[in-house]
Image (spheres, helix red, strand yellow):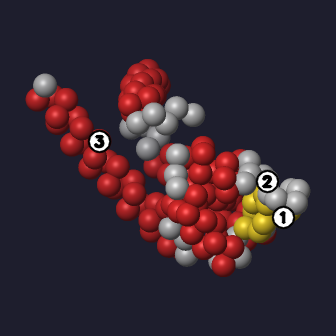
Amino acid sequence: MKTNRGAILLISAINKEINFLFDNLLSELEITRTESLYLRIIYENPGITQYDIAKLRKLEKSLVTKYVTNLEDKGLIEKKALDKRRKGLYLIDDGKKAITFVDNFLPELQKKFQGLFSDKELEIFVSFLEKLNTTLQEFNGREF
């Protein structure tokens, strides 16, 4: 069990460093990590409603409203009527630029880690990470 406790602490330390890296990246865009997640959801699901985001992420509607309002105020998204009662969320130009900025950063980050693992080691490592992610999602009741 000692090995597991050490592994969890190491994963936590790695997560802390990744969060620090992304917080610095996102500060250039003047958005938070949570706002970037909302942008990603809207980017991948154009026209999604606030209700659907709350349901998808298992969040209170008031919290979703707060972040959607922040993104609207920052000029990254807009609401468009889907019908008389529902409004869909869409990225506007600056929101699309933010997604592109983040998407371009990730391959650059990956390049820094090329050669760290052999192809076989990388395959095993990714397999372990996928198992861990799936287990945590199931444990948290957040299977996507």
Residue found at the very far bottom of the displayed protein: 73
Disc 2 target residue: 47
Q: Residue 139 sits in which quadrant?
A: top left
Coordinates of residue 101 in the picture (x, y in percent):
64, 62
In this view of the protein, which residue sits in the foreground, 22 or 82?
82
Percent from the top left, x then y, of residue 124?
41, 22
In the picture, which quadrant includes the C terminus?
top right
Q: Earlier in the sequence, mark 3 or mark 1?
A: 3
Q: CA distance from mark 3 to mark 1?
A: 41 Å
- Residue 93 drawn at (x, y percent): 78, 69
Q: Amino acid at mark 3?
A: Ile
The residue identified by callout 1 is 80
Q: Is residue 78 left or right of residue 132?
A: right
Residue with the mark numbered 3: 11
Please tell me whether mark 1 sits on a helix, a strand or a loop: strand
**Mark before the other along the chain sequence, 3 or 2:** 3
Looking at the image, do the residues carrying marks 1 and 2 touch, with CB atoms under 8 Å apart? Answer: yes
Q: Nearer the viewer, mark 3 or mark 1?
A: 1
Q: Could you give the CA–CA distance between mark 3 and mark 2, rounded to whole angstroms?
A: 35 Å
Which is nearer the eye, 134 or 6? Answer: 134
Tag 2 secondary structure? loop
Q: Amino acid at mark 2?
A: Gly
Q: Is residue 113 above or below residue 126?
A: below
Q: Callout 3 environment at 10 Å: few (<14), some (14 to 19), or many (20+)?
A: few
Query: Which residue in the rendered view is the most extreme toward the right?
Result: 83
